[in-house]
Amino acid sequence: MQIGAVGKAGGEQATGFPVRAGDRSVIFFFLLPAFALFFIFLAFPIIKSVYYSFFDWAGFGPAVDVVWLDNFKRILTDQVFIKAVVNCLILIVLALLVQLPFSLALAMLVGRSLRGRAVFRTIFFMPYVLSEVITAAIWLILLNPMPARGFINAVITLIPGADPVLWLADPSLVMISIFVVLTWKYFGLHLLLYMAGLQSIPKEIEEAAVIDGANKRQLFFGIILPLLSSTIRTSVWLSVLGSLQQFALIWIMTRGGPVNSSEVMSTYMYRYSFVRFDLGYGSAVAIILLLISLTFSVAYLRLFPQRDHLSGL
Amino acid sequence: MSRKIYMFLSLLAILAFALTACGPAATEAPAAEEPAAEEPAAEEPVAEEPAAEPVTITWWHIQTEEHQVALWEGLAAEYMAAHPNVTIEITALENEAFKTKLTTVMQSNDPPDIFQSWGGGVMNEYAEAGLLKDITADLAAGGWGDTFAPGALGLYAYNGVNYGVPRDAGIVGFWYNTELFAQAGISAPPATWDELVADIELLKDAGITPIAVGAGDKWPGAFWWEYLAVRIGGKAAFDAAYSRSGAFTDAPFVQAGEMLQELVAMDAFQPGFLAATWGDEAIAMANSNAAMDLMGQWAPGAFRENSADGVGLDGKLGWFPFPAIPGGAGGAVDALGGGNGFVVGINAEPEAIDFLKFISSVDSQTAQAEIGMSVPVVAGAEVGLTDAMLLQVQQGLSAAEYFQLYYDQYLPPAVGSVVNDAVAGLFAGTLTPEEAAQQIDDAYAAELQ
């Protein structure tokens, strides 16, 4: 009925079924499944989490013990949570300063003129195809402290006088080790993004710059980097959100240990929800994590709006 | 016109999608619960037979060693052969994976029919949430309950209600590699703490890693602190802290932390112990990379499973109880330990309880003892226990004047996990003994509020 009414208001076709309204309802119907899935698996759980975050609740049976904002107060004053936030920040900073420039440098190499670049591209992208669980399992073996079992320590102990390095057991090393593994896994994705970005830069611009006498450095900083800005924007955004939400790899490799030294926000959330049986508290952590990610995402997209340098060409 | 048809078709498709989504749940549930409702099923000849209705029993256990899996599967097959209407779905999970997976199904109110439990605080939490089935009446009927050792059965009761039965019981003790001890020139296992410390020095001098511990999994490390507290403070200290006439910040608990950190300081543990799991610990022992391991009665099976040759330490494995601490309030025979058992989920059918009875029979218990999987808790099954060391464990258990269930099982789960985390902090040196004790006491105080 609604559709008919809208159609008459539009009054575009005599046949009775106006195009616009029809299109709109078709769009609506096709969106319905996606909408339903979004609501059931995303919006509803978030609302539930907000609700549970006000309770002191183990996760079994009905939640009855309301504590209002007490969970949030405890989280924000907990040293371990602060540590988890700091660790997330460390991952983000390292990713931005090391992982992304490294990927870009590689992209400049293999995206352009290196011989056999197709082979390199495949090899570099391979780790990204593996699941985080498998990546973690592989690196657990590689980093094993016993030289008889861990390949890396086996190589290190070949050097006379060198002791095995406790990659994951040394609280001061563990975040670095995890960062190396994360980089190994994800640089291929950024490499691919940058390569696609590089390919979309028209050769003519570079050639024009060269003819005008630009050297390699000027070419890179004056032409390539600005024209890659929208790719870099996407890559930074993906990388920061990925670091904020990193869970599986860290949980499998260290479970946030030794003693919270590799704790990140999501392992902290998991620990309280499912190991310490404090699902109310865990829900509150989830809400905080959501707010942080959302704030970053919105602020980032506002501060760095999409600029398209190439569309005018 | 064609647009209308198109619209109609897409509506139909969406409706079909919605209907199929609801489908299985709507049709299956009543069929499973009351297939006796004859009217709609009249065409199906199966429904008219008076045969017992089909029942599916879900069973989660944590025995992953080859012999143990085979034993359980054999028993399930035997039961299914005798009861054609029963299907038993076994899920065998590794310890840590089991805990993770169980927590999720429990939080979604869907417990398995029969599953592994260590009794104590975690089980009590499930019971309070109404996730476990009361089997008190079943245990009373036909004297089933009387077949179990009373102490072991009591671990699976809460507020006078039984929720499960024990499978085995034992105490934590030192498993050691006799060959490595001989290499280091140690003639007899240590009986006192000072002797243990001296032996650690001897092993180190011989270039052998004295002790393997999976401090990354936390509970294997917590055994050390808990056992030290049992020896130093005895029953009195724990009871005082537990009843709040004392506290976990009392001297024995702090001293336990100090002695533990002395061991860490003298490099008694394998390199990388902070990140090591119980699996790493077992691998180190099984392949003779470490000489000693403070672990429960399941250790020999794990050594076999984790050894390169499948034999493990058979023939060169020894056991000795936790050494006495002179001046400690706890006796040398007091023990820290616990057992494994099965509890019954709230949705279990009567057949599940019958099956539980079947797998905890004397025959089953004897078979378990024969392969060294369980220290039996059913009278008459001791005959199966031929393994000399498991016999030692059993004797240690029966000799204990004060038996302390592992703290992380005895205490409420929120406190137990803090015990584990705090002791991991002691191992890492990030917490002082006082701070660790304080954290545990704070968690317990908060839980009691």
Image: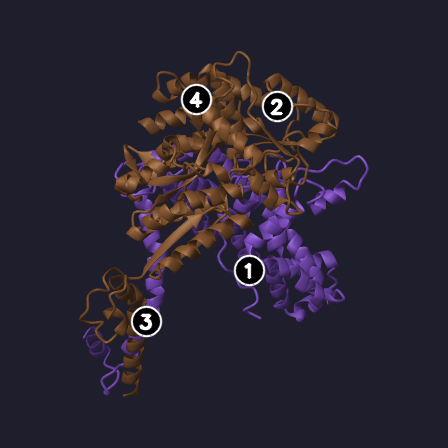
Can see residue A93? yes
Q: Residues within 10 Å of mark 3 (few under 14, many from 20)?
A: few
- Please determine whether, in this image, residue A84 is positioned above or below residue A116: above
The dot on residue B17 is 3
| Quarter location, residue B160 | top left
| Quarter location, residue B189 | top right
Say if labels 2 and 4 share a chain: yes
Q: Colour of chain A?
A: purple
**Label 4 is found on which chain of the structure?**
B
Residue A124 in the image, given as x and y percentages of width and height:
66, 59
Q: Which residue is the site of mark 2?
A: B263
**Which comes sooner in the sequence, label 2 or label 3?**
3
Mark 3 lies on a secondary structure that is helix
Q: Residue at x 74, y 59 (%)?
A: A216
**Label 1 is found on which chain of the structure?**
A
Whether pointer 1 and pointer 3 mark residues with C-beta atoms closer than 8 Å, the reply is no
Q: Which residue is the site of mark 1?
A: A230
Whether pointer 4 and pointer 3 mark residues with C-beta atoms closer than 8 Å, the reply is no
For the view shown, which residue lies furthest in the right direction?
A160
